[in-house]
Image: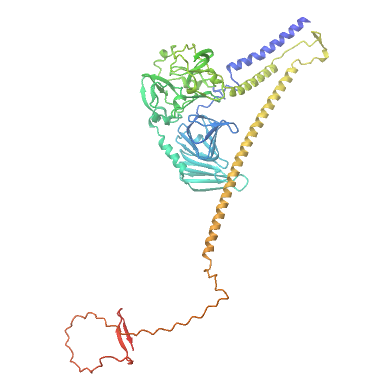
Amino acid sequence: MTHRLAHTAALLALAAFSTCAPAQTVLQTAPPDQVEAGSGVLETEPPGRVGRVSLVQGKVEIGGDIGTESSAAVVNWPVTTRNLVTTAPGARTEIRIGSTSIRLDGDSSLEFTELDDDSLRLRLHFGSASIRVMNSEVVPEFELRTAQALVRLNQPGRLRVDADRVPDMSLVSVLDGEAQVDGAGASLTVRTGRSAEISGNGVRDEEVRTLQARRDEFDDWSLTRDQTLVAEQSSRHIGTEMTGYEELDRHGSWSTNSDYGSLWTPTTVASDWTPYRDGQWSYIAPWGWTWVDNAPWGYAPFHYGRWVQVHNRWAWAPGRLERRPVWSPALVGWVGGGNWSVGFGAHNLHAHGWYPLSPYDRYVPGYRLSDQRLRRLNDWRHATRRAAQQRPGPHRGLTVVPREHFGGRGPVVVPRAPRPDRPQLAVPRGQGSAPPPPLVARAGLREDLRNEQRNERRDLLDRRPVRLDTERVTRDRFEVDRGRVDTDPMARQRESNERLARERAQQQERRQDERDRMQRDLDNRLQADRMGFQRDRAQRTEREQQERMRERAERMQQQQRPPVLSTNPAPAFSRPEPRPMPRPEPRPEMRPSPPVQRPSPPPQMVAPPAPRPQPSAPAFTPRGDNSPRAHTDPRGRQVQER
């Protein structure tokens, strides 16, 4: 009996060991959900193209997904798939993806539904967006959706899209180039200077019409930004598809080195400046710890290429010119971890450090990356000093902070972190590992790993046949009858696995229900905001109409009002006395005015007639004579009187 018990215990131990060993191997070599495709590329490989927040004016927020918590956007923050960017009224922001620029006006919400190496898909929930695409290779990858329309580009150009500024209406204006607009059951091509207006919400009749495109202050601002961000030298050295290239010409100078090729040196920093010290570390999925620099130019030099020291100054070496370079969260080497302690003030604390990688250092990512992309990140054209540079030596530009700063919930702000007492530190040999995820991200990773272990254990138990002795067993005065022993010794284990699977499914359903609830809450809030905006606008319009109608009625009443009559007649008891009629005054005598002397005409050569005898006339005409008299008034008119 004792032999049988020992045999049974050995089989159980063997089954448990065979279950746990592969699970530990998976944790060390293959993270959860990692699948190797036939081409050697990991299916869950993060994208190699990432955007950048290049300008923030006012209150701008960026979130990981709809329904998740948002944070204030800062310059140089990475933008990737499922990021939601929202601007408050009066605010503006700009996102750059290589040579493509996307700008949002105030009171707008834009979602990056898909941003990877092969596609750039956006969704404008509400507000106004200005998009400029310069590269013809990006044209087939671009797509923008609103609630009423789908917009694609036929050639490089500039677009202006307004969504829900007017309820249930989208306006697509083509300021340069040509676009294809689909919506309301129609598809039309919109050329430069024209707009397409699509209205309808799927319930009422939908309508599509074209009209002349109109520019406003937001379009002028976007055009001014495009004219300002011109980097001719940087485009020659690194191309236009490296995100952040447009800021380099204004803050540095380019040169060529025989060992490193093209070099860019910042001119707006101090002489003792060191890379990766003026910024913060933020944990961003799926890459992990990501560097966000404080300098306006601090994007491309910290996510592409390497840093070198030339003439005791730091310079950035971008490497070979590529059509579309691979993005990295931070090209640094990590030091410390484990029990490495450094003196900070009066205390020795566990610490983590990092230093900028040189062109001859190998970059080891902390996330899933294919061999092809890893070769592109570590393969350099100029390799004349590779053997010399790979010798062990001090890490130049090393920055060290206490390890506890990486365990909090917020970012690690490096300028605020304490510095070691001694500048020269005893650095452990070998390259260290990146700090572990913070508490918030660690909880989610732990749950994923636990689920992965359960799945692996269930699969192994289902595949491995195990035979146990089912005869009557007596141990420690505990007896089990033969008839009560299960015929299948692994039935209980299968039931346990099934129960775990049901619990996992229920947990996933609860998570999905929570996401759906948060999505419904967000939709309800957005709908309530839209309805409130529409209601306020309708009330304002109604008040303005009433005011105009009242003013119009007052004007018409004033124009049609009769003349005002006297409203104070004389009282009835007072009778005015008759006034005597004035006697007509005698007319003044009309006396002839003296004749007006006119200039005599020039003499003519005519013989004078013979004089006639004139009758004698009285000296004056008596008053009673009625014979007509003629004279000339002061105006020169002939007047006859009697």
Examine the rendered structure and indicate whether residue 278 appears above or below residue 596: above
Q: Residue sitting at 58 percent across and 41 percent down? A: 147
Quarter placement of the C terminus: bottom left
**Place of residue 33 in the rendered image (x, y in percent of width and height, measured from the top left):** 60, 23
- State the residue in front, 113 or 640: 640
**Colour scheme of this structure image?**
rainbow
- Horizontally, is 128 left or right of 249 in the view? right
Q: Residue sitting at 41 percent across and 36 percent down? A: 228
In the rendered image, which quarter is residue 549 located in? Answer: bottom right
Query: Can the viewer see residue 22 in this picture?
Result: yes
Q: Could you tell me how many numbered marks the image carries?
A: 0
Query: Can the viewer see residue 175 in this picture?
Result: no
- Horizontally, is 379 left or right of 494 in the view? left
In the rendered image, which quarter is residue 545 located in? Answer: bottom right
Quarter placement of the N terminus: top right
**Place of residue 533 in the rendered image (x, y in percent of width and height, measured from the top left):** 58, 44
**Place of residue 93 in the rendered image (x, y in percent of width and height, measured from the top left):** 49, 36
- State the residue in front, 413 or 112: 413
Examine the rendered structure and indicate whether residue 474 appears above or below residue 62: above
**Place of residue 522 in the rendered image (x, y in percent of width and height, measured from the top left):** 61, 36
Examine the rendered structure and indicate whether residue 282 appears above or below residue 188: above
- State the residue in front, 447 or 585: 585
